[in-house]
Amino acid sequence: MKYYILSLNHTNNEALLWWRPNNSGYTIYIDDAGKYEHDVVQKNKSYYDNKRETAAIPCNIADEFAVKIIPSSANMDKFVKFTEEVGA
């Protein structure tokens, strides 16, 4: 089983932030999120799935409920500002 890692610290009412592959930043786009192996998450749950800052979400569940975001000129400035604030 593979997991997406949800950043609880950086998620807000506007967008969920997922970890990119190899612990390399954040993304609002689930298609750009990293897929982390079960054994990697289980070996370091305090980092990947501590429920305060991070939550490991099974990819099959997240993919089932994911909604694609299609940027438009009306909302692009808001997302650019948001991702810059969290260092995504």
Image (cartoon, rainbow, N blue to C red):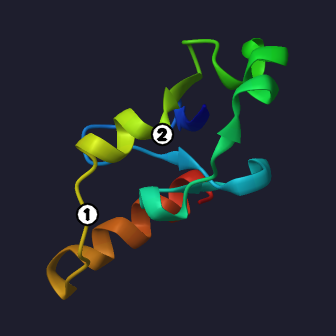
Element at label 2: helix
Q: Nearer the viewer, residue 44 or 26?
A: 44
Element at label 1: loop
Q: Position of residue 75 (x, y in %)?
A: 21, 73
The quarter of the displayed image where residue 40 is located: top right
Q: Amino acid at mark 2?
A: Cys
Q: Is residue 26 above or below residue 32?
A: above
Q: Is residue 85 above or below residue 23?
A: below
* Outermost residue toward the front in this view: 1
Residue at 56 percent of width and 55 percent of height: 33
Q: Position of residue 69 (x, y in %)?
A: 25, 66
Instruction: Tell me if 43 is positioned left or right of 65 in this view.
Output: right
Figure quadrant of the N terminus? top right
Residue at 26 percent of width and 47 percent of height: 14
Work out whether residue 24 can be spotted.
no
Residue beneath disc 2? 59
Quick one: label 2 or label 1, which is nearer the N terminus?
A: 2
Instruction: Tell me if 29 is positioned left or right of 38 in this view.
Output: left
The quarter of the displayed image where residue 68 is located: bottom left
Work out whether residue 77 can be spotted.
yes
Instruction: Tell me if 49 is positioned left or right of 66 in this view.
Output: right
Residue beneath disc 1? 68
How packed mark 1 is, by other alpha carbons closer than 10 Å (few <14, some 14-19, many 20 or more), is few
Q: Is residue 33 above or below residue 8?
A: below
Q: Position of residue 50 (x, y in %)?
A: 64, 12
